[in-house]
């Protein structure tokens, strides 16, 4: 069985194309692996932050409670201001 030169050049071209596709896949996988490693570092940093806050859990909860109280107070103030504005507008129209 003899191999024809055209067959070799066609096979070579296909092999080069496949090699190029493999390089592309390798590059994509390398980026995905790097991204996963980045997420793992972020997860580890978050875990460490959580652990560092644990001993101060009571302080953290107190601070969180103060923030929520302040925000709800702000919401109440906004609601009261809106009511006052509506009453004032209503009073001016009469």
Image: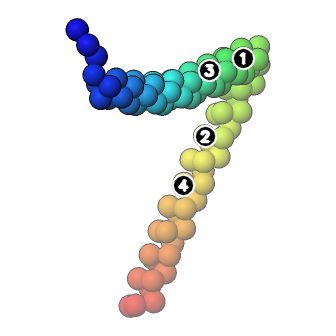
Between disc 2 and disc 3, the foreground one is 3
According to the picture, the residue beneath numbered tag 3 turns out to be: 37
Rendered residue at 51%/24% (across/down): 26
56 vs 77, nearest the viewer: 56
Quadrant housing residue 27: top right
CA gap between label 2 and label 4 equals: 12 Å
According to the picture, the residue beneath numbered tag 2 turns out to be: 68
According to the picture, the residue beneath numbered tag 4 turns out to be: 76
25 vs 67, nearest the viewer: 25
Between disc 4 and disc 3, the foreground one is 3
CA gap between label 4 and label 3 equals: 45 Å
12 vs 77, nearest the viewer: 12
Few, some or many residues within 10 Å of mark 4 (<14, 14–19, 20+)? few
Between disc 2 and disc 4, the foreground one is 2
Rendered residue at 45%/76% (across/down): 87
The label shown at residue 48 is 1
Of callouts 2 and 1, the N-terminal one: 1
CA gap between label 2 and label 3 equals: 35 Å
Give the SS element for disc 2.
Answer: helix
Give the SS element for disc 3.
Answer: helix
Between disc 1 and disc 4, the foreground one is 1
Of callouts 1 and 3, the N-terminal one: 3
- Confirm whether residue 1 shows in the render: yes
CA gap between label 1 and label 4 equals: 37 Å
Q: Position of residue 25 (x, y in %)?
A: 46, 26
Few, some or many residues within 10 Å of mark 3 (<14, 14–19, 20+)? few
Q: Position of residue 33 (x, y in %)?
A: 56, 21
- Confirm whether residue 18 shows in the render: no
Above or below — where is 83 with respect to 55? below
Image position of 12 (left or right of 31)? left
């Amino acid at each position: 069985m003899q191999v024809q030169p055209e067959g070799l050049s066609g096979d070579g071209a296909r092999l080069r194309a496949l090699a190029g596709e493999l390089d592309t896949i390798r590059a994509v996988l390398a980026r995905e692996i790097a991204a996963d490693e980045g997420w793992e570092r972020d997860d580890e940093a978050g875990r460490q932050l959580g652990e560092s806050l644990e001993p101060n859990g009571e302080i953290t909860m107190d601070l969180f409670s103060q923030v929520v109280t302040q925000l709800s107070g702000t919401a109440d103030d906004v609601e009261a201001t809106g009511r006052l504005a509506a009453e004032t507008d209503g009073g001016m129209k009469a």
